[in-house]
Amino acid sequence: MDELARLIDALSQQPEGADDKLFAIATVVNTKGSVYRRPGARMLIAESMKVSGAVSAGCLERDIIAQCETLVDAPRPLLLTYDGESADELIFGLRLGCDGIVQILVEPAAPIKPSLDRLQMAVPELFSRTRKVAAVTVFAVQPSIVSESRAFTADDLIGTALLVTDAEDLELQALAPMVKIALLKEARAALDCMQSQVVEVVVDGLTLRAFVEVSLPRHSLLVFGAGQDTVPLLNIAEVLGWQTTHLSNRNFVEAYEALNGQLFDSCVIMTHDYEADKLILESLFRQNVRHSLPGYIGIVGPKRRSQKLFAELALLGIALTDDQEARVFSPVGLDIGAERPEEIALSILAEMQAVRTEHFGGLLKDKQGPIHSTRVSLKVSDGNDNLMQFPEVSSINASCNILDV
């Protein structure tokens, strides 16, 4: 759920005045069935057609680039629908790796530059004040031809138009009042249930389909420890794109208190020093209230060691509540037979991922139902409360389909 934060990171890495400028952004906005990437995944395409990021396992990127080349002379948003269930995809050589359906919105960068600039400035500021933001991206408008009496075209409505938090909202592009009200309602509902959704709203004769993306900051990890075993853990966390803070000097408590109450999603204590661990835990539980305590607190060492630690804390007047106990993991890590420092690091980070996504870390071959979470789903229903199906698609260039909007 941190794809929006990752987009801001990627945009900030685009050097000002670079020769190979950003040309387009491709965003997964809707999926059905088995697909490799979920809604919110993005890919940046440069003018040279080089890409960063991915929206599939590699089977769609080449065709998306081909679509971008058609936008050089006529920049306008495109909504591409790739159907892994269709035999036509195999006939024309696309060879999709999954059998689901994925819709990808391709937006040329030039027309949306003002919105991108506002997005790049607003998201870090919003994340500094709140832990969750909903971004509303309109990806389909019907009818596609908007009446001449309107002050906008259908293409004007396409794209990321709105950022919403529990307390405020920000327009990235001008919206008609009734459109904004309808989209705000959907964004607030998504924030309430912490679930990204594809929604459909009907306003003033227009039907808009939008992806409401509930986003969190990048996962933040605090690591206490000065040993060599912290190195692979920090390296793998960096590969995952997590934001890490490493406290490696021996005065761990002083270093932690110098962070001035900074919030962390997870922390792991790997000092291998009993007294240091006790002081760290005392500082963590004395200073933090429920909403600011990390959701995961891992302690390296056997269970009897951590039990002794918390017994001593209880004598100091620090008795853990049920909620606090649920956040503590010791022994730390998943049981994957880890022995070497790199394997132990993988075990610890895998457990963190399982906890933050509320999964159990079992074998996928034994899992009943879909591989991916169904937290992002098509919410629109018909009169019988059945989920609406994807619209009929028409072939456009022997390799992909485009939604008829």
Image (spheres, helix red, strand yellow):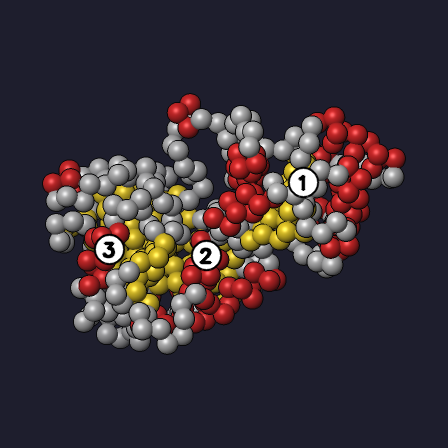
Residue type (three-letter) at the residue carrying disc 3: Ile
Real-space Cα distance between discs 2 and 1? Answer: 28 Å
Q: Nearer the viewer, residue 317 or 204?
A: 317
Circle 2 or circle 1, nearest the eye: 1
Whole-percent x, y for residue 235 in the image: 52, 47
Q: Label 2 neighbourhood size at 10 Å, few (<14), some (14-19), many (20+)?
A: some
Residue at 64%, 47% in the rendered image: 223
Residue at 26%, 52% in the rendered image: 61
Q: Secondary structure at mark 1?
A: loop
Residue bearing the label numbered 1: 270
Q: Nearer the viewer, residue 109 or 386?
A: 109
Whole-percent x, y for residue 261 in the image: 71, 56
Residue bearing the label numbered 2: 6
Q: Which badge, 2 or 1, is on the more N-terminal residue?
A: 2
Residue type (three-letter) at the residue carrying disc 1: Met
Q: Which badge, 1 or 3, is on the more N-terminal residue?
A: 3
Name the image quarter holding residue 303. top right
Q: Nearer the viewer, residue 256 or 114?
A: 256
Q: Label 3 neighbourhood size at 10 Å, few (<14), some (14-19), many (20+)?
A: many
Q: Which mark is residue 64?
A: 3
Say whether residue 192 is visible.
no
Q: Secondary structure at mark 2?
A: helix
Whole-percent x, y for residue 338 in the image: 54, 29
Residue at 56%, 66% in the rendered image: 125
